[in-house]
Image (cartoon, coloured by chain):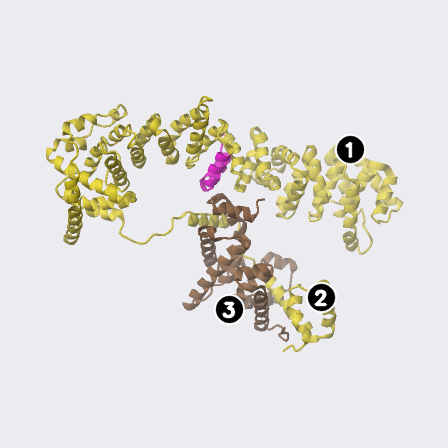
Chain colours: A yellow, B brown
């Protein structure tokens, strides 16, 4: 047990939370108190052990897998309370019932029926429609004529005169449903309907066919409920999507504005190509323009793209007098586009080019980033030039950092370089430069030639560097310097050959970065010397002063030796700069400024090296010579 | 780079892209914490998934009183504590860390301690792992966040839902217990 009164300061001291004065005073105490000293040593040993614990991390594929698993969890719908599924109930409806289930259903159906009877008496019967008239009214419209001439359920219904009674009964049930279950949707509505209509089913009535007939009832509420039930029946498998006459019936019904939207939703539920052709045609009807276009937009279907694009471009290019309303409609519809495939990406790009507001495009892409980002990335990496161009345009609006890598890959394609550089600058900034170095590294491995890879990537690298401000270049150097050595080296390779003002500033940043590996800084200095680039004199001197103590330590206090390896290259190259700027005198002043022994031999050697470098025609040879002279690798 | 607060606000309005960026930003730290608290990678990855799924579903309740990172850490800690409690009640043994999380052997060889020294270090780490696993959850959580993850005491306190003073006490107590367990000099006490 430590009984020292000062030991109360131990936790803060161990945690390095004492201020400087307190820490100094406590360290004085430690020199005298063995107990506290022992405690500190024990905690330092523990810190050391804790620091050496393995550091768990996932990288590469493992990390991507985990991210995907998280995305799947986030996207998963919330769990719902367990109850019999609608499919199970449908099976009960469609299959022979067990005795118990039949009894239960009969009770339920009977109860519903009893509940409906007074309503039936109070409700005027539906206007009788001769069955033959129904068939005539369902004569297929032009597109429907192409469907196979299968026996129509309507014909069955129409020819069954005994069904007129059931039809009225069904109408009563639907009215009741429409009033009592307005809030119910889809499966819930269908379940209630199936229970209520069970007596009809038991009398052999084909309910789905009757529903289709009722779509044309004068009572819009009835027709709308019928359409909702029809859609639910299709979704739950109680009605075939290719039921003959089904689409034609909906097409006819949607011409009446009082029920049109429900019919479009039923067509959406059917979801076949033929159904969406009908929706596309419905967009021409004034009362259905918006619902039909929205249905196409959110369908996520490839075959909806073409009619949708035609309609939306028409709206965006409409006459100036109509423009306000049309553009607003186009924006509302565009905001609902499901970005599920590359054609949808192309559609959005075409709309953006046609003047769709940036904020609409941005919101659309970001809201669906789970699909839009992978699609844009795939298009950027693909061989389809048009898709790549679209993806480059949209990448800026998407502004997702996951696009930096694919954009960097696209930047290495000469044709795409100009627009993609702008996208990279806006999304990635400094990270984009490092991403380009990564692409270069990958290509170098693939092609087995660093030179070829560097040649491919350098134009984009130079252009991007030229577009970035100094602070972002500094940040890029910092990121590269802390990256894995091969990537850092590739980054330096590109920085050393980068053309234009960006290259010079990047080399200056590399030279200036304290954490950059010494070899990289030396190479930057060599490249600057080789190119005759000027760096700020104060920066040079400050840089050399920064280096001096560390180099002095490395040389056992002997100061900096320009002949030594590593930093020698840097030192000499900087001296070359000084010399080329002001001759031997400047060189001597530079040596004095950083406190180096400026003996005549060293001055002469640096001056000679400077002259050689600057007079050499062949750059590589000049670097080789300097390297040999200073024993540092190029 | 967008700051966490802006991203969290966007995510709470349903922006999945913003949430994905936050996940990307805090994935590694959360995984490290979960591995440290649960002792094996499989459970830790499950915990990380659960943590971010909960974060997404509860974004509306994120009031911004702490940073997003601290908030997520709080969710992770609570979940790990629940998992740990359930596991202990089933008397399950904590599986050893998988090989991929073993200390960097190359790094060890670069510092080139002698083979007996390596064996000692290995034994020390195993004992430390075991001692950490034996600590009460609140002490282990506090020590993990402060000493291993390097969080400030204010963040540790927020993540643990306690005061800064308590967080300091937890960390110190955890240190003392580990020191004793590992046979370091345990003469000191505050």
Q: Are marks 3 and 1 on the same chain?
A: no
Where is residue A368? Give x, y as percent. Answer: 45, 40
| A394 vs A133, nearest the viewer | A133
* Figure check: A565 above or below A222: below
Relative to A571, B132 lies left or right: left
Mark carried by residue B136: 3
What segment is highlighted magenta in the picture?
A359-384
Question: Foreground residue, A349 or A581?
Answer: A349
Q: Give the residue number, with chain letter if any, for mark 1.
A: A616
Chain to which the residue tagged by mark 3 belongs:
B
Membership of A368 in magenta stretch: yes
Dividing the image into 4 quarters, which one contains the N terminus of chain A? bottom right
Q: Which class describes the residues within 10 Å of circle 3: few (<14), some (14-19), or many (20+)? A: few
Q: Quadrant of residue A207?
A: top left
Decide whether the magenta segment is chiefly helix, strand or loop. helix
Q: Residue A540 at x, y = what percent?
A: 78, 43
Disc 2 + disc 3, Cβ < 8 Å: no
Q: Which residue is mark 2?
A: A23
């Amino acid at each position: 047990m430590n009984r020292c009164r000062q030991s109360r300061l131990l936790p803060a001291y161990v945690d390095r939370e004492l201020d400087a004065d307190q820490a100094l005073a406590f360290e004085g105490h430690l020199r005298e108190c063995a107990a506290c000293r022992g405690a500190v040593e024990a905690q330092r040993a523990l810190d050391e052990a804790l620091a050496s614990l393995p550091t768990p991390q996932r990288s590469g594929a493992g990390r991507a897998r985990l991210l995907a698993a998280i995305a799947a969890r986030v996207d998963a719908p919330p769990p719902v309370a367990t109850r019999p599924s609608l499919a199970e109930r449908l099976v009960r409806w469609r299959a022979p019932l067990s005795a118990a289930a039949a009894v239960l259903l009969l009770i339920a159906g009977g109860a519903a029926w009893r509940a409906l009877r007074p309503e039936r008496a109070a409700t005027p019967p539906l206007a009788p429609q001769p069955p033959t008239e129904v068939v005539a009214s369902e004569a297929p419209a032009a597109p429907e004529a192409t469907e196979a001439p299968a026996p129509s359920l309507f014909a069955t219904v129409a020819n069954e005169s005994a069904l007129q009674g059931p039809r009225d009964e069904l109408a009563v049930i639907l009215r009741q449903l429409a009033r009592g279950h307005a809030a119910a949707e889809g499966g819930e509505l269908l379940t209630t309907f199936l229970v209520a209509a069970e007596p009809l089913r038991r009398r052999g009535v084909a309910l789905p066919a009757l529903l289709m007939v009722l779509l044309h009832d004068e009572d819009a509420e009835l027709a709308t409920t019928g359409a909702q039930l029809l859609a639910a029946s299709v979704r739950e498998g109680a009605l075939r999507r290719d039921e003959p006459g089904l689409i034609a019936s909906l097409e006819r019904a949607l011409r009446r504005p009082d029920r049109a939207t429900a019919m479009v939703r039923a067509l959406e539920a059917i979801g076949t190509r033929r159904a969406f052709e009908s929706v596309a045609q419905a967009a021409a009807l004034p009362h259905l323009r918006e619902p039909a276009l929205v249905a196409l937009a959110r369908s996520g279907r490839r075959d909806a793209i073409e009619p949708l694009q035609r309609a939306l471009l028409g709206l965006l290019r409409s006459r100036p007098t109509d423009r306000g309303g049309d553009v607003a409609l186009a924006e509302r519809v565009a905001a609902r586009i499901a970005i599920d495939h590359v054609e949808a990406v192309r559609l959005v790009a075409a709309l953006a080019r046609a003047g769709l507001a940036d904020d609409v495009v941005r919101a659309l892409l970001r809201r669906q980033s789970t699909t839009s980002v992978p699609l844009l990335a795939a298009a950027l990496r693909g061989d389809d030039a048009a898709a790549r161009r679209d993806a480059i345009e949209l990448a800026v609006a998407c502004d997702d950092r996951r696009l930096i890598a694919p954009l960097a890959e696209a930047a290495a394609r000469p044709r795409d370089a100009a627009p993609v550089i702008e996208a990279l600058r806006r999304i990635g900034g400094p990270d984009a430069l490092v991403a380009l170095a990564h692409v270069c590294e990958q290509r170098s491995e693939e092609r087995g030639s660093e030179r070829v890879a560097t040649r491919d990537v350098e134009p984009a690298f130079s252009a991007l560097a030229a577009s970035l401000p100094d602070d972002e270049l500094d940040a890029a150097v910092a990121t590269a310097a802390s990256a894995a050595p091969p990537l850092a080296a590739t980054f330096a390779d590109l920085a050393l050959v980068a053309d234009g003002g960006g290259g010079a500033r990047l080399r200056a940043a590399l030279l200036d970065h304290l954490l950059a590996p010494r070899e990289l800084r030396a190479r930057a200095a060599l490249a600057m010397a080789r190119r005759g680039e000027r760096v700020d004199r104060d920066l040079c001197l400050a840089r050399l002063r920064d280096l001096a103590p560390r180099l002095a330590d490395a040389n056992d206090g002997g100061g900096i030796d320009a002949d030594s390896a590593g930093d020698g290259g840097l030192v000499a190259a900087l001296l070359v700069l000084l010399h080329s700027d002001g001759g031997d005198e400047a060189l001597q002043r530079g040596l004095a400024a950083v406190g180096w022994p400026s003996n005549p031999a060293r001055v002469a050697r640096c001056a000679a090296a400077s002259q050689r470098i600057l007079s050499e025609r062949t750059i590589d040879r000049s670097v080789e010579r300097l390297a040999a002279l200073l024993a540092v690798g190029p | 780079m967008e700051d966490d607060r802006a991203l969290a606000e966007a995510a709470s309005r349903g922006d999945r892209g913003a949430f994905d960026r936050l996940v990307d930003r805090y994935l590694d730290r959360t995984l490290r914490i979960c591995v440290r608290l649960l002792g094996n990678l499989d459970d830790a990855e499950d915990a990380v998934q659960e943590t971010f799924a909960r974060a997404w579903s509860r974004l509306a309740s994120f009031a911004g009183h702490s940073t997003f990172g601290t908030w997520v850490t709080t969710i992770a800690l609570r979940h790990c504590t629940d998992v740990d409690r359930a596991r202990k009640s089933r008397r399950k043994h904590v599986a050893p860390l998988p090989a991929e999380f073993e200390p960097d052997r190359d790094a060890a060889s670069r510092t080139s301690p002698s083979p007996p020294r390596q064996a000692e270090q290995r034994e020390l780490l195993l004992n430390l792992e075991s001692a950490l696993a034996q600590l009460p959850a609140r002490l282990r959580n506090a020590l993990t966040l402060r000493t291993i993850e390097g969080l400030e005491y204010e963040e540790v306190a927020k993540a643990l839902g306690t005061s800064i003073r308590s967080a300091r006490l937890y960390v110190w107590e955890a240190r003392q217990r580990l020191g004793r367990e590992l046979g370091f000099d345990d003469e000191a006490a505050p």
